[in-house]
Amino acid sequence: MRTPWKRGLVAVAAATSGAAVFAGVGLAQPAAAAEFGGITFYTNHDFSGTEVRADPADYECHTLPQAMYSVQNYSLTQYMDVYYKADCAPGVPDSPYTDAVLRLDGLQQSGTEVATGFRSYRVLATTP
């Protein structure tokens, strides 16, 4: 049988290790991490630079104001299609990939090396 002070020590150790795990999760995110539940595009490949926030409840096609080279979808339930051309047109400019579209699930991030970057997006109303 454990003595009361040992039970308290075990509880403190468990609480401390749990807090360390949560702190580690917070530290693993990029410095300019998107807000949880949001979708953010960045002008740089490393999720930095100028940010453009998307409205996760707006399901229309949106052309981005400039080329974006990385995106974070921190929404739990929203999927989105990201396009390399304006007006949500599929394909990669100046390439044989005429039907290319990037689909991002919730809690996913991606970058692109395509010279034109990401040019438009559409948040999907339902999970495919």
Image (cartoon, grey):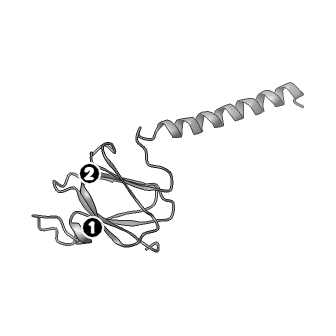
Crowding around mark 1 (Cα neighbors within 10 Å: few <14, some 14 to 19, many 20+) is some
Q: Give the side of residue 67 with respect to residue 95, left or right.
A: right
Q: Is there CB contact under 8 Å for labels 2 and 1?
A: no
Q: Quadrant of the C terminus?
A: bottom left
Vertical placement of 53 versus 50: above or below?
below
Residue 95: percent from the left, percent from the top? 11, 64
Decide which of 43, 16 is in the foreground and name it.
Answer: 43
Q: Residue at x 22, y 71 (%)?
A: 90
Q: Give the Cα distance between marks 2 and 1.
A: 14 Å
Count of all numbered marks drawn on residues in the image: 2
Residue 116: percent from the left, percent from the top? 17, 57
Quarter of the rendering containing residue 84: bottom left
Element on which disc 1 rests: loop
Judged from this view, the residue extending furthest toward the left is: 94
Q: Residue at x 70, y 35 (%)?
A: 15
Q: Check residue 69 in the rendering and tell me which mark sits there, or answer none.
A: 2
Q: Amino acid at mark 1?
A: Val
Quarter of the rendering containing residue 14: top right
Q: Give the side of residue 55 with respect to residue 15, left or right.
A: left
Q: Check residue 101 in the rendering and tell me which mark sits there, or answer none.
A: 1
Residue 110: percent from the left, percent from the top? 33, 53
Decide which of 34, 27 is in the foreground and name it.
Answer: 34
Q: Earlier in the sequence, mark 2 or mark 1?
A: 2
Judged from this view, the residue extending furthest toward the top is: 5
Element on which disc 2 rests: loop
Q: Amino acid at mark 2?
A: Tyr
Q: Residue at x 17, y 64 (%)?
A: 92
